[in-house]
Image (spheres, rainbow, N blue to C red):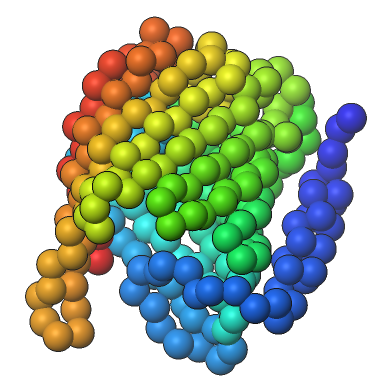
Amino acid sequence: MKYTLQKFSFVLSFFCLFFSTNISAQTPDSTKTDTVKKGKLLMEIGMYSRYIWRGVNFANSPSVQGLLAYTNKKGNFEVGTYGAFTFTGEKRGYGNTIELYATYRYKKFSFTIDDYFFFEEVDSLNKFFDYSQNITTHFIESRVQYDHKYFSLMAAYAFYSRTSDLTRGAYFELGIPITSELKFIAGYLTDASFLNFHDGGGFTNIGLHATREIKITSSFSTKTKIALIANPNYANTAKLPAIVQSPMHFLVGITF
């Protein structure tokens, strides 16, 4: 079944309208926020040694990343965008990407619709506003996450993409906080998925992620991040220019 851009826009609009109703939920952990009428504006800028997502090293270049989002007063609905761009200007390896998302939270559950767009090396191929399935490079994914005191569990599946793209695989991720600054992550892909840049299933993202807040002044602080990430399924990582087929990654970053 083929979706048109109009159909997708209607579904996303309905999602945003329905879930922005005032259902009580806890306010999520956030980055820097500015209060606006009936909600908050979330903003974050990050510099990372590499852009590594779900165990894949994109473009093999330092990465500049940013978040801009709005969350409503109750904290149960969020809509925003996340972007990553290579620091060196490298266009190969899909290290330049934009994600649009909408999230609804209810108690310990969150439900998210993501729209990922990966920029091609050739500028003329970057048809951002074209959602037709014969040409689009958008991937639209649904995610469900359960957050417990002692663990988090997320399931994700790309339900819309270019017809020729294989998206059979669902991605599952377990998170276990070890301390307030250290977290263990294990991600598993059930089958091939072009969104996840793997030609076969397996564990793709196993690692330790450390975060420490450093206060600069009473009103300004930064977060330093270090991660050691293993990809046991690296042999199935997509064989594309500037996509790194490596079993281990070491990531360093700082966010403002």
Residue farthest top in this picture = 235
Q: Is residue 142 above or below residue 40?
A: above
Residue farthest left in this picture = 216
Residue 187 point in image, percent of width and height = 45, 30
Q: Name the foreground residue: 98 vs 127.
A: 98
Which quarter of the image is occupied by the N terminus? top right
Residue farthest right in this picture = 1
Q: Residue at x 62, y 28 (%)?
A: 170
Q: Residue at x 79, y 49 (%)?
A: 8
Q: Name the foreground residue: 243 vs 187.
A: 187
Name the side, left or right, on which 2 lies relative to 190: right
Q: Residue at x 17, y 59 (%)?
A: 212
Q: Name the foreground residue: 189 vs 8.
A: 189
Q: Is residue 120 above or below residue 17?
A: above
Residue 112 point in image, percent of width and height = 63, 53
Residue 125 visible somewhere in the drawing: no
Residue farthest front in this picture = 150
Name the side, left or right, on which 51 lies relative to 13: left
Which quarter of the image is occupied by the C terminus? bottom left
Q: Is residue 140 above or below residue 232?
A: below
Q: Residue at x 53, y 15 (%)?
A: 201
Q: Is residue 59 above or below residue 4?
A: above
Residue 196 point in image, percent of width and height = 51, 27
Q: How many discs mark residues in the rendered view?
A: 0
